[in-house]
Amino acid sequence: EDQVTQSPEALRLQEGESSSLNCSYTVSGLRGLFWYRQDPGKGPEFLFTLYSAGEEKEKERLKATLTKKESFLHITAPKPEDSATYLCAVQVKNSGAGSYQLTFGKGTKLSVIP
Amino acid sequence: NAGVTQTPKFQVLKTGQSMTLQCAQDMNHNSMYWYRQDPGMGLRLIYYSASEGTTDKGEVPNGYNVSRLNKREFSLRLESAAPSQTSVYFCASSEDRDSPLHFGNGTRLTVT
């Protein structure tokens, strides 16, 4: 069974205090790993897609990395506006309909304190 | 661009009542999805439509039906609502199966 585990469940940071969020996964074959940001009362917003071990993507203060077992979302010098829940999702290699189904983690709730 | 629009934003139903959640996208995407989000659980796929004219079950389809009305619109119907269907429902769309999902802002449904 495909599994996605995110840690920690919640993280409080001081403004400017860098840290990392973890997404570990167990799947039969990874087609893609997605990171989303979700603000309260809103739908998830796409951040990154990673496809193979060693790949890295960056956007402003965020950098996502991928290994064969996990992905990290590194947040450098966070600001209060980075406060949100960050979701990780995996897409499994499947030539059929199964590749349309993403398995989501439960998310990490990040709070950045001024 | 509006992106993905869901209606209504909030709904309260009594057990046994029926309702349809509406979703429309203006990005000319081929694929559309319905997810539910519950506290302490990840987003779970209810149904999806890979392309206009097709629909398939996801992880948690029981108690729901869907209709892909045209390329823009994908509706979710609860025929006889149950308290276990209290949740936040998100519609999403993507260009194809490998493209990122674009989500609407959700419908918050309470079944009493």
Image (spheres, helix red, strand yellow):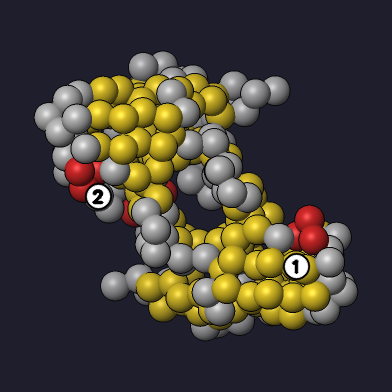
Kindly identify which chain the residue marked by label 1 belongs to: A
Whether A104 is drawn above or below B59: the answer is below
Mark 1 sits on what residue?
A: A112
| Residue A83 quadrant | bottom right
Residue A3 horizontal side relative to residue B63, left or right? right
Residue B112 occupies quadrant: top left
A4 relative position to B26: left or right: left
| Point 29% across, 43% down: residue | B86
Q: Locate residue B19, reporting x and y percent.
A: 26, 23
Chain letter behind tag 2: B
Query: Could you say where residue A30 lies in the image, as x and y percent from the top left?
Result: 48, 69
Left or right: B60 as drawn, with respect to B43: left
Q: Could one spot residue B54 in this view of the protein?
A: no
**Occupied quadrant, residue A78:** bottom right
Quadrant of the rendering where the C terminus of chain A is positioned: bottom right
Label 2 Cα crowd, 10 Å radius (few <14 / some 14-19 / many 20+): few
Please name the amino acid that badge 1 sits on: Val
A79 or B32: which is nearer to us?
A79
Vertical relation: B14 (above or below) A27 = above
Q: In the rendered image, which residue does mark 2 sit on?
A: B60
Where the N terminus of chain A falls, by quadrant?
bottom left
Position above or below: A100 against B70: below
The residue at 78%/56% (across/down) is A81
In the image, is residue B28 above or below residue B61?
Answer: above
Image side of residue A87 versus residue A65, left or right: left
